[in-house]
Image (cartoon, helix red, strand yellow):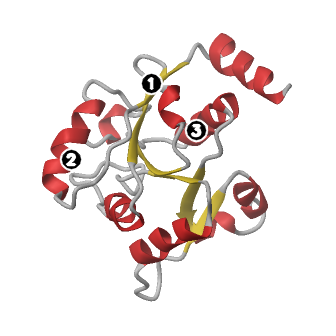
Amino acid sequence: MKKRLYEFIFFRLMGWKITGANNLNVNKCVFMVLPHTSWHDFYLGLFTRGITEVPMHFVGKKELFKFPFGWYFKWMGGKPLDRTGGLNKVDAIAKTFDDYDELRLAIAPEGTRKLVSELKTGFYYIALKANVPILPVAFDFGKKEVKIGEPFIATGNYLEDMNQVLPFYDGVVGKIPQRQFIR
């Protein structure tokens, strides 16, 4: 029932579509979600998760998980990220993959909804250290399309690997285009 409601809202009322959902058949991965320019990306991810019925998780700054919405974000698959104290977050997050048979972690490499000139590399090194594939995901507001790419295995050469992955995002338009990363 919930899935049908999501489909009605997402497909019929909002006019969006999902392509590449057949690539979601991996139990563990890091979703590389670009561009991340607006809070609207969050509910698009929730609709995508509900429609595909594939469990997906995300990390967010720990402040999101405080009252009054903290319970909601945890219920929706969120994991709080404490960015203080010089903790090695990449290693800590990569290790969490050992604790689950199924974990699909969505990370926005821009690290913010503001314009950035470079992507943060944490998503890449989490996937590399956890030995899980990266799945490129794009919320294309220009085409009203959630695009899910082919799983990609990191080789350890970040620059070469990004030259392979980033073309997937060519032509994708974020909700607020002037905020999106452009390579």
Q: Residue furthest bottom?
A: 85
Q: Which mark is residue 141?
A: 1
Give the residue at x 67% y 28%.
51
Say few, some or many: other residues with alpha carbon within 10 Å of mark 3 (under 14 / 14 to 19 / 20 or more).
some
- Amino acid type at mark 1: Phe
Is label 2 in a helix, a strand or a loop? helix
Q: Which residue is mark 3?
A: 45
User: Which residue in the structure is indicated by mark 2?
Assistant: 162
Q: Quadrant of the N terminus?
A: top right
Q: Nearer the viewer, residue 30 or 120?
A: 30
Indicate which disc, 2 or 1, sits on the residue closer to the N terminus: 1
Under circle 3, the secondary element is helix
Gap between marks 3 and 2, in whole Å? Answer: 23 Å
Q: Is residue 105 above or below residue 52?
A: below
Report the amino acid beneath label 2: Met
Point out the image quarter for the C terminus. top left
Measured as percent of width and height from the top left, residue 151 is found at: 38, 40
Question: How far apart, in angstroms, are the residues tagged by discs 3 and 1?
Answer: 13 Å
**C-alpha distance separating marks 2 and 1:** 23 Å
The residue mark sitting in front, 3 or 2, is 2
Could you tell whether 42 is left or right of 151 in the image?
Answer: right
